[in-house]
Image (tube, rainbow, N blue to C red):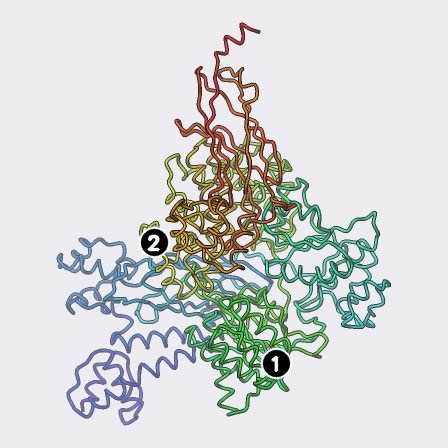
Amino acid sequence: MELAKLLERVPIPIKESLEEPSAKINVLLQAYISQLKLEGLSLTSDMVFITQSAGRLMRAIFEIVLKRGWAQLAEKALNLCKMVSKRMWSVQTPLRQFHGISNDILMKLEKKDLAWERYYDLSSQELGELIRAPKMGRTLHKFIHQFPKLDMAAHVQPITRTVLRVELTITPDFQWEDKVHEYVESFWVLVEDNDGEFIHHREHFLLKKQYIDEDHTLNFTVPICEPLPPQYFIRVVSDRWLGSQTILLVSFRHLILPEKFPPPTELLDLQPLPVTALRNPSYEALYQDFKHFNPVQTQVFTVLYNTDDNVLVAAPTGSGKTICAEFAILRNYQKGQDNVLRAVYIAPIEALAKERFRDWDKKFGKGLGIRVVELTGEMATDLKLLERGQIIISTPEKWDALSRAGSNENIGDWIGATSHGLFNFPPGVRPVPLEIHIQGVDIANFEARMQAMTKPTYTAIVQHAKNGKPAIVFVPTRKHVRLTAVDIMSYSSADNGEKLPFLLRSLEDIEPFVDKINDEMLKAILRHGVGYLHEGLSSLDQEVVTQLFEAGWIQVCVISSSMCWDVPLSAHLVVVMGTQYYDGRENARTDYPVTDLMQMMGHASRPLLDNSGKCVILCHAPHKEYYKKFLYEAFPVESHLHHFLHDNINAEIVAGIIENKQDVVDYITWTLMYRRLTQNPNYYNLQGVSHRHLSDHLSELVENTLSDLEASKCIGIEDDMDLSPSNLGMIASYYYISYTTIERFSSSLTAKTKMKGLLEILASTSEYALLPIRPGEEELIRRLINHQRFSFENPKCTDPHVEANALLQAHFSRQSVGGNLALDQREVVISASRLLQAMVDVISSNGWLSLALLAMEVSQMVTQSLWERDSMLLQLPHFTKELAKRCQENPGKNIETIFDLVEMEDDERRELLQMSDSQLLDIARFCNRFPNIDMAYEVLDGENVAAGENITLQVTLERDLDGRTEVGPVDALRYPKAKEEGWWLVVGDTKSNQLLAIKRVSLQRKAKVKLDFTAPAGTGKKSYTLYFMCDSYLGCDQEYSFTVDVKDAAAFDEED
């Protein structure tokens, strides 16, 4: 009876008879959603059973439909999930999801024929009038604007003819209220086809409370096919709010697909080339490990070793391209003495440059006596290395910086490789074939997904790395490194009991090595034959693990993804466990760059040991198709010059290569970007490929770039055509810093800036904008901030500039920061030296004396890791604050400077310091190298200085080298790399705080320097101060006062 009554009251008609169980369930579920009251007890208990399961079952249906990619059904299933949990129908007003609105008012609203979007346009007064309840207007207005609403914009770029990259920007447009939204709101991002039938891409998006005011960027790829559909739809739907969804139409009307690539180079079935083909015993000796070159090397040998043609070789990681480069080097070297070998090798990152230097220094340096050098990034050092070196190894930044400062020639036109010098091998061509397995794991939550990947990773090792063959596992972070290594060890123990299948030598053999390890967890895991590597391990720990793995004593090594370029290890099997990392700037998970993934796969290659390598990639299920595509299909190389054009153009204007706007256009036509513009126009925001489109695009690009440079005062534009560099532009180009940084220095520094402000300006530069913020680091940075000398106003711990400031201050305070933050600090400190030199130049251009001296002091602080108020003695090795205090309170004579310590009697010093002989030797070594410089100066023709005329001050400098032949690098224990000392000579007027002349000096043994400045307009005796400031040591600056008697210019005229 009661069911029959309910049947009449539920909104959706039911066809089946009530005897059917499905009809009863349907009625009860509708009654539950409609919030109908039940009378009988038996129905109430049935209702409880149904409603407990309904939400769960609906979710399961939604997930199944979502995975199948059925768009319309997924939308209906998600709506039903929300209706069950909210107990309301989707046709009712979304405001039913808020508490505090009476049913009468909700009914009134539902009777109004007003679309939900229209409510956003109404004021509280209008809302009150609409429902004839003026008092409720404000409440309704508040709830409407708390309802989750997102704005979206999409930028689409074709990568190939079948893959589109989408950059989706999501902007929250509602007011966050903790009681309503708690800490996080979750949404589904769905990309649907033109008919709304199929889901091409899906991902889960979490909006956290702390990021409500920020734009969120999601990057993903979607497939497209020809003929092109007219459009796709991007739908973002709330996971729990009914009625909260945003739909964005992405039209393909103006989409131009890239040109088809020429077919890749076919790997020919050639007879493997013997090493003796080099026809030179000393060259053949370099390749003793093998008798024949591999197929790729064999195919390119003739054009590289026997001709002078330009050549481009593109092939997968691990296919032996380095040896191809060596053919070209040997070709050049064999031409004899008249033709001095000069080669530049550019590696994308420092770790690869270092590895290449070690390898080639041994191979070519010791083997053939070729001078191999690696650039340091220190301008003075690098110019010397460039003169001396025959093979110069560098990263792009260091080479670019040096080529700007050292040579003004345009470094070479775009590679002119003819058809027989062009080898473009497809991804499948490898000397050691690579078997790739891709497995998708369909769990939305990142940490849960990583946890679910550990068992498949272990299984992959057991299946694919039989007979003790080595296996490497790459994971996103150092946290995952430790967790995964422990999990692999645990699975192995569970399967094998006491046996240790991953330990390939006895415990007795391995124990002496394990004892050297500092990390306790690593010690325990190594005894099971599993090692791990991450940036936080000491260099000794890293070395031990690397050696044990290379020697084949342990079978498995788990490595953090960011080290894929740093480790020289190779294995039979590589498992890439997860293909995403956390990007703190976007506070989202981001896919590994394609290059990183290729590099990881390249570690599965042991050319002389294996006939094939294996790679297992575990990824989030929605990305599986994308990886399948790109691993078997070559992706084109696109230019990124348009993102870096400002600084390149500025450098060319400074070098005098570009003198007017036409030169800029000509310059661009020589670039790879220009070649690719017509091949893939949409990638570069070009809407067509006609001559007109191209010309308009280039004109706009040039105009925008130049007007930005002009606005930041880096260049001047005359007659709307001619370009000239300004002082700021020259500084930016010389120190290799961004034009936005120079603009920041120029606009933010003032004569009154103090230390706190100077550090804030230094940390706010665009050079620090890319510091990574990793998960869990916010708390560490917050703690760092709280312990610094200078406080922060409303610090945002995810801001890289705040991190840079905190890390700099921690460096001065010698506070220890560990792990990845220590790596960030290294970058911050190295960049700070260059930025401060540029800052000194900007300040001197404004003639501010005290601020220039302050910036020079900060440069010393950066090098020695001290505050300016700390004891100078802390620069010495083995010195502590307590010891420095004891020296300052030394009875008889306070010891405050390095020179005070040097002048002490040996016995007194030994008594005061109470150190071992080896420690005293370190101190003696430091003191001997500490700059001891005699300085003399005179005003040339000082008797005849006329008002307003030039004054020349000649300074003579002589260093006491104490028996050494050269100065050598700075003694700075905490500076992360070798540094050459530099000096500034400054003439200033302390009364007016004016800097009158400045020269940068790099002093070896002796130097004579002239400083020119203008005499004042008034006559009489004028006092000046001469400063000699170091950029690397505290306590060796010198300061002298001198006077000049300025005479009336008219008197000189009469004498003449």
For the residue pair 63 and 345, the one nearer the viewer reads as 345
Q: Earlier in the sequence, mark 2 or mark 1?
A: 1
The residue identified by callout 1 is: 553
Q: Is residue 1005 above or below residue 206?
A: above
Q: Is residue 380 left or right of residue 745?
A: right
The number of discs equals 2
Q: Is residue 464 left or right of residue 77?
A: right
Amino acid type for the residue under numbered disc 1:
Trp
Residue positioned most to the bottom: 19
Tell me which corner region of the image, top left, top right, bottom left or bottom right, holds residue 1: bottom left
- The image shows residue 587 at horizontal and vertical percentages of 41, 62
- The quarter of the picture where residue 499 lies is bottom right
Residue 642 badge: none
Q: Which secondary structure lies at badge 1?
A: loop
Judge by depth and name the residue closer to the eye, 308 or 861.
861
Q: Relative to 745, say whether 263 is above or below.
A: below
- What mark, if any, has residue 795 been given in the picture? 2
Q: Residues within 10 Å of mark 2 (few under 14, many from 20)?
A: few
Residue 369 versus residue 3 in the image, above or below: above
The foreground one among 193 and 677 is 677
Image coords of residue 81 (percent x, y): 32, 77
Mark 2 residue type: Pro
Q: Contact, CB < 8 Å: mark 2 with mark 1?
A: no
Report helix, strand or loop for mark 2: loop
Assign the C terminus to one quadrant of the image.
top right
Residue 997 in percent (x, y) is at 51, 29
Per the model, the C-alpha gap separating discs 2 and 1 is: 49 Å
Instruction: Return the x and y of residue 33 as percentages of the image width and height.
Output: 25, 78
Q: Name the residue at 54% across, 32% down.
A: 717
